[in-house]
Amino acid sequence: MATKAEELGVEVYPGFAASEILYDENQIVTGVATNDVGIAKDGTKRETFQPGVELRASDFENTGRITLLAEGCRGSLSEKIIRNHKLRERGQGQHQTYALGIKEVWEIEEGKHNPGSVIHTVGWPLDTKTYGGSFLYHLDDRQLAIGLVVALNYRNPFLSPYDEFQKFKQHPAVRKLLEGGTAIQYGARTLNEGGFQSIPYPIFPGGAIIGCSAGFLNVPKIKGTHTAMKSGMLAAEATFKSLVEGSSMELYWENLKKSWIWEELHKARNYRPAFEYGLIPGMVLSALERYIFKGKSPYTLKHGRPDHEATDTANLHAPIQYPKPDGHITFDVPTSLYRSNTNHEHDQPPHLRLRDPTVPERVNVALYAAPESRYCPARVYEYISDEKGDPKLHINAQNCLHCKACDIKDPKQNIEWTVPEGGGGPGYTVM
């Protein structure tokens, strides 16, 4: 797709991470700046140092500049814009809620492969108070995409989404499908699950937010590519009119509400919050939405607490004992991480930052039994005993899959995910 865009005259800059919003003297967004590269862990400049670059939107015939942010789920710059301009409150008003999707790509035996087959499940192996489910997609060339999506408003701090996924693969029907096959890729990413109730007002002075940065995922379908692309098309049309005709970017918001995106998400709005009441009530309410009301119910359910506030203290739950990986169907994290081709420059400032370095030991360990050591699907966060035998948090930033779960789920919102040097991260290959 990048090649197609470049053929049309679009300039693409791979390997550069946008780390800063640029403003003019009137606090109107004028573009973004990439981060400096070649900075060592101690803050000194290495021989490879290159300063960041300011990418400013063109002032088209003095009609203004437009910057469109399309960073995906929980985009760093988009979240700052949403907070600073209170766009969530100006939109549908509710907070965003998220899920963590963990995925493997397998090459399975010919006789078990059914190209085009799509299977979704809900519930097991998750407990009845945790929303989530699996997907199995039969791709071409004997390949199978298999994964588990776990809502990040789960309560039990001992729950490990990674280990729940490994447990899912032990189901007899799933294990039979995978036996004789080979796991060839691994990855993880958070998803927007707030849906219609969480759509922010997408326009800010000097630009707009599009795609999953705004959050247009259709939760029951686990599908958002189509809505993301459509929102980009609507924003592009509004941008063109703004630059050429001098009209307002408000046109993007107006057309968004008239589009099939709005209609589709409105019909699907009650599925996700229905499971705030548990698996069985959620299934009942979803059946009513699907077969009786058909998306036209007279009520709109609200989301529960934000994901980071949903975690219970450890004293309310018992530790979960997960089975050890067998190395054939189930795997440990280092083995899976190898399949993600994740790589970061080791000698760089950490891109995972603690707002208060005392919180991990003082709060997370003491009250929540160190949940970051389990919700991270790359084991970035681990506690190592110091010389006194007390646990101290160690951050393996080089393992980071850029899933953003830590930025969302940390009970005190103490972890800030920032962009590393451009080009760092998982190296997923096109299958």
Image (cartoon, rainbow, N blue to C red):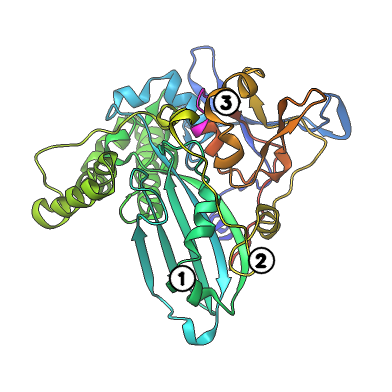
In front: 149, or 393? 393
Distance, label 2 to label 3, CA atoms, is 31 Å
Q: Is residue 414 visible?
A: no
Q: Which residue lies furthest to the right in this view?
A: 47
Residue type marked 1: Val
Residue type marked 2: Gly
- Vertical arrangement, residue 161 with respect to residue 396, above or below: below
SS at badge 3: helix
SS at badge 2: loop
- Vertical arrangement, residue 391 with respect to residue 342, above or below: above
Residue 196's spot in the image, x, y percent? 27, 39
- Vertical arrangement, residue 83 with respect to residue 268, above or below: above
Please state, as top left, top right, bottom left or bottom right, where the C terminus lies in the image.
Answer: bottom right
Instruction: Give the mark, 1 or 3, whose residue is nearer the N terminus.
Output: 1
The residue beneath circle 1 is 174
The residue beneath circle 3 is 364
Residue 361's spot in the image, x, y percent? 64, 22
Q: Can residue 90 be seen in this view?
A: yes
Instruction: Give the mark, 1 or 2, whose residue is nearer the N terminus.
Output: 1
Q: Residue 159 carries which label?
A: none
Q: Main secondary structure of the magenta part?
A: loop
Residue type marked 3: Asn
Residue appearing at x 54%, y 12% in the figure: 25
Instruction: Give the mark, 2 or 3, whose residue is nearer the N terminus.
Output: 2
In front: 82, or 30? 82
Distance, label 1 to label 2, CA atoms, is 16 Å
The residue beneath circle 2 is 327
Residue appearing at x 48%, y 19% in the figure: 28
Position of 374 with respect to 248 (left or right) is: right
Residue 33's spot in the image, x, y percent? 63, 29
